Amino acid sequence: MKAPERTTAEVFPRYIGGEVLADSATLKWPGLFARRCRFPRVVDGYLVPATAEPLITCTLNGSAEFQERDIGGEWLPRQVRRGDIFVTGSKTPYELRWRSPLGAEMEVIHIHLAVDQCLAAFEMVYHDKAGAVEVTDFYGRDETLVYLSFACAEMLSARTAGNAKRVASFAQLLAIHIAEKYTNIASQRPDYRGGLPIARLRKIEDYVRAHLAESISVEALAEMVELSPFHFSRVFKHATGMSPLQFVTRERIVRAQQLVRETSRSLIEIALEVGYTSPSHFAQVFRRVVGVAPTEFRSGL
């Protein structure tokens, strides 16, 4: 079924593929729509329609080499694993695709917060500013939101009825957490304890990919997002699971693999293009990350 550019939380599962394991719609939960879903190992790409209701996604099990993009834009890669969180209030659709290791197919929970539930939380948190509040995008680690997402999954599995008081309390708590951390007003506060806002994370990613042949320091990356190197390193690892230098190394080797696969250029040329002036150092890092030396990688293609 072709996905529309916009839909509602109620019919959202029709367009995302995968197998719905549990759905709050049958339980008549007030204030939110929650679905626990299992996906195939390889998903070549599909359109995720925008919804008026903000969406929280948490990976419950599995992992994947994951990519997302605006329609027709450049694919942005991520390594998704258990406990990773996506929050979006996007008004436009976007595209996803991914590939999981064999036996590590992803199981996720999608939670849409009802518009009325969000508005009530905005008014509680921001009072007279509530009318200007919008949910912003976030990708990273948030232990509180992970805990709430797993609790939601457990309530789904237990088939907790919608008239249970804990369901209404849970929806309110979740909405207040989103209001306090993932809104345009909240993002104006210098609080990065839960990870980097997705716009700043993408700024770092784009810079690194455009400057792989150059020396890239933690200090320079931290300056781009106006944080101290120490604070930046902490929140970057919180958001991605990697230190900034580990991320730079991964991006260099991912690019090197692409060049080895798609060109006939020498390994020395490729090493220089991704920032390694020493061929032996390049081979050593390549083997550590990929598991085989560059020469073995090329001969196995």
Image (spheres, rainbow, N blue to C red):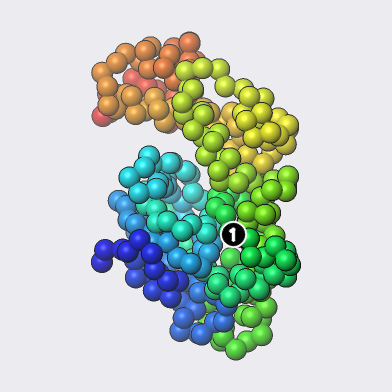
Residue 106 sits in quarter? bottom left
Which amino acid type is marked by label 1?
Answer: Glu
Instruction: State left or right for residue 170 relative to residue 209.
Output: right
- What residue appears at the point 48 percent right and 22 percent down from the top-left corner? 212
The residue positioned 60% from the left and 32% from the top of the image is: 244
Q: Residue at x 63, y 56 (%)?
A: 183
- Compared to 203, does 15 lie above or below? below
**Residue 39 shows in the view:** no
Judging by the rendered image, the residue that carries numbered circle 1 is: 134
Relative to the observer, which residue lies in front, 178 or 299? 178
13 and 93: which one is in front? 93
- Asked if residue 54 is positioned above or below residue 299 in the image, the reply reads below
Find residue 37 and report its horizontal and vertical position in percent: 43, 67
Quadrant of the rendered structure where residue 293 is? top left
Identify which residue is drawn at 50% across, 72% down.
34
- Residue 67 appears in view: yes
Tell me the quarter of the image containing the N terminus: bottom left
Residue 267 is situated, as x and y percent measured from the top left of the image, at 35, 15
Q: How crowded is mark 1: few (under 14 residues within 10 Å), some or many (20 or more)?
A: some
Instruction: Check the image and report above or below for 229 versus 168.
Output: above
- Label 1 sits on a secondary structure element that is loop
